[in-house]
Image (tube, grey):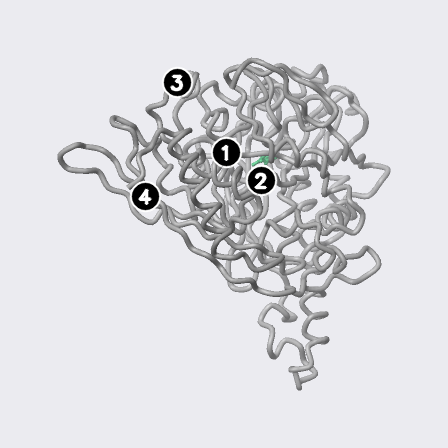
């Protein structure tokens, strides 16, 4: 890309050799699904907000998506070689400016403004990623944080007593909680001993976990009601007990479990999983705020906790939405099914249009290295949105082992990353691509060249694609793979 100007919403930014934001992404910036009345993402946001009532909590829903690398990464202790900083993972406006990859990018600024005890931030976030029914390069997150000010404690006392008092005021969520690990562990999940007494950490953790359990109880009570709304409206059921034909509706209390986790910006850290329809489902990440964040933001006396949750994942299970692309649909057959005035009920698909599979095989340019983890990327990591900014080791399938952007700063043409394939496909096919899977890869024993085979599933959610349309899209994809990645089609 030549040096120039890129417009994001109503603002303009200079581009440079780091710029990698395609048109379909800049166009998504103005959509703001979390603010569209009656949109399922907006309704999901409001449902979660209801677990954090005003005036103690303050909601920030209009923060602009362009942030500095300092806001998105440095202020949150991301090491310089963290894979999340890579151009293969993140949309760069230019070297120092990105589309936020998570709502945590605003933590430091909100701490700095020091407005209230608790805040929620809901916003669109952007990540280069696999293409399948649970991954889209734009999605929505909610960030929450609850802080207490040391200046409010009596001299010589820590804040734990005050925090436990707030804990006791929280309602009982009435769910089963498994929490097998100690609150902190010197190796796996350390206390920030310089900043928190053990008693404070225990109190913050207890308040955090209880608050999140309330959120989860709120969400899944609504989900159960939604499933019941489905069962009672389906005429096929002759029984008056909806749980007869719907395994998700039982009177069993909801079960959740706390898992130790790692984020550069919290310690100790956890993930919450919920037992839903027979599986443990990862819901969110959270932890005790790393004290250097409020300290660097000019409020060193504030201590507390933070969490981040992906809204699409929640909306998909609340409304039984089968494909993440549907959220972007402007089709009234989709949009008309949701309303703040209606009870939550499962989405009724208007039709299942046929899939159209097309394969592409190519040789990578000679001596191309395949970024480690790229092979496992597509299809794996189902719905791992909330996890993708974790540490390298903990990141699992979503962010594993990308090339270090600081040692290959202009993305050496010899490094192949699967996300570059995804971007080309998305750019050509927009929302007509359902998923892209790596089917085969091998290295030629003599030439040492690497060959990859991907299977692309073209499908519209709104109409039947003709084979000719799919062929045209596919040949454009093939041309661009050659042109941009320098591969050789087989
Ligand atoms: N920002 C994290 C993510 O996107 C989630 C998170 C937020 C974790 C706040 C801990 C605290 O994965």
Are circles 2 and 1 on residues that touch, CB within 8 Å?
yes
Q: Position of residue 242 (x, y in %)?
A: 66, 77
Are circles 2 and 4 on residues that touch, CB within 8 Å?
no
Dot placed on the residue nearer the N-terminal end, 1 or 3: 1
Give the distance between the C-alpha atoms of the residues marked 2 and 1, in whole angstroms: 9 Å
Give the distance between the C-alpha atoms of the residues marked 3 and 2, in whole angstroms: 30 Å
- Residue 287 appearing in the image: no
Label 3 residue SS: loop
Relative to the observer, which residue lies in front, 319 or 386?
319
Q: Position of residue 105 (x, y in %)?
A: 64, 26
Q: Is residue 95 above or below residue 456?
A: above
Residue wearing tag 3:
408
Q: Which mark is residue 361?
A: 4
Dot placed on the residue nearer the N-terminal end, 3 or 2: 2
Relative to the observer, which residue lies in front, 138 or 85?
138
Q: Is residue 188 above or below residue 77?
A: below
Label 2 residue SS: strand
Disc 3 beta carbon < 8 A from ligand 1?
no
Give the distance between the C-alpha atoms of the residues marked 4 and 3, in whole angstroms: 26 Å
Disc 2 beta carbon < 8 A from ligand 1?
yes
Which of the two discs, 1 and 3, sits closer to the camera?
A: 3
Residue wearing tag 1:
390
Give the distance between the C-alpha atoms of the residues marked 1 and 4, in whole angstroms: 32 Å
> Residue at the left extreme?
446
Residue wearing tag 2:
285
Dot placed on the residue nearer the N-terminal end, 1 or 4: 4
Disc 1 beta carbon < 8 A from ligand 1?
yes
Q: Quadrant of residue 479?
A: top left
Relative to the observer, which residue lies in front, 119 or 470?
470
């Amino acid at each position: 890309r030549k040096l120039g100007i890129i417009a994001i919403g109503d603002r303009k930014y200079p581009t440079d050799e780091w710029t990698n934001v395609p048109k379909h992404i800049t166009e998504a910036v103005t959509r703001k699904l979390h603010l569209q009345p009656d949109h399922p993402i907006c309704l999901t946001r409001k449902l979660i907000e209801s677990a954090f009532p005003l005036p103690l909590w303050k909601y920030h829903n209009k923060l602009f998506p362009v942030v500095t690398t300092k806001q998105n990464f440095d202020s949150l202790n991301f090491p310089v070689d963290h894979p999340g900083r890579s151009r293969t993972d993140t949309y760069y406006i230019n070297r120092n400016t990105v589309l936020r990859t998570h709502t945590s990018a605003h933590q430091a600024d909100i701490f700095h403004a020091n407005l209230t005890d608790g805040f929620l931030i809901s916003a669109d976030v952007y990540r280069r990623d696999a293409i399948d029914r649970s991954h889209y390069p734009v999605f929505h997150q909610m960030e929450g944080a609850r802080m207490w000010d040391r200046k409010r404690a009596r001299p010589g006392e820590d804040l734990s007593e005050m925090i436990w008092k707030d804990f006791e005021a929280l309602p009982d969520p009435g769910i089963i909680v498994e929490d097998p690990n100690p609150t902190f562990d010197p190796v796996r999940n350390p206390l920030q001993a310089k900043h928190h007494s053990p008693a404070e950490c225990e109190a913050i953790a207890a308040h955090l976990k209880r608050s999140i359990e309330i959120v989860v109880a709120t969400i899944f009570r609504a989900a159960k009601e939604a499933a019941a709304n489905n069962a009672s409206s389906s005429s096929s059921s002759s029984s008056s007990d909806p749980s007869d034909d719907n395994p998700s509706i039982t009177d069993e209390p909801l079960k959740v479990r706390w898992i130790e986790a790692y984020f550069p910006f919290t310690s100790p850290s956890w993930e919450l999983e919920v037992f839903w329809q027979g599986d443990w489902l990862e819901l969110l990440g959270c932890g005790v705020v790393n004290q250097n964040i409020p300290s660097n933001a000019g409020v060193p006396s504030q201590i507390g906790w933070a969490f981040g949750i992906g809204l699409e994942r929640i909306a998909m299970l609340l409304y039984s939405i089968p494909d993440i692309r549907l959220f972007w649909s402007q089709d009234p057959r989709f949009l008309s099914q949701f309303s703040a005035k209606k009870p939550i009920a499962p989405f009724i698909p208007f039709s299942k249009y046929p899939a159209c599979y097309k394969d592409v095989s190519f040789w990578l340019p000679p001596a191309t290295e395949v970024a480690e983890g790229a092979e496992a990327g597509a299809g794996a990591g189902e719905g791992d949105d909330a996890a993708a900014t974790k540490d390298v080791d903990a990141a699992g399938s979503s962010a594993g082992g990308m090339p270090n952007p600081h040692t290959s700063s202009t993305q050496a043409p010899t490094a192949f990353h699967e996300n570059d394939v995804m971007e080309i496909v998305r750019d050509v096919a927009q929302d007509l691509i359902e998923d892209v899977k790596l089917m085969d890869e091998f290295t030629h024993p003599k030439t040492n060249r690497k060959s990859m085979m991907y299977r692309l599933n073209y499908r519209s959610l709104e109409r039947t694609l003709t084979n000719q349309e799919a062929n045209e899209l596919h040949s454009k994809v093939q041309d661009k793979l050659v042109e941009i990645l320098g591969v050789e089609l087989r």
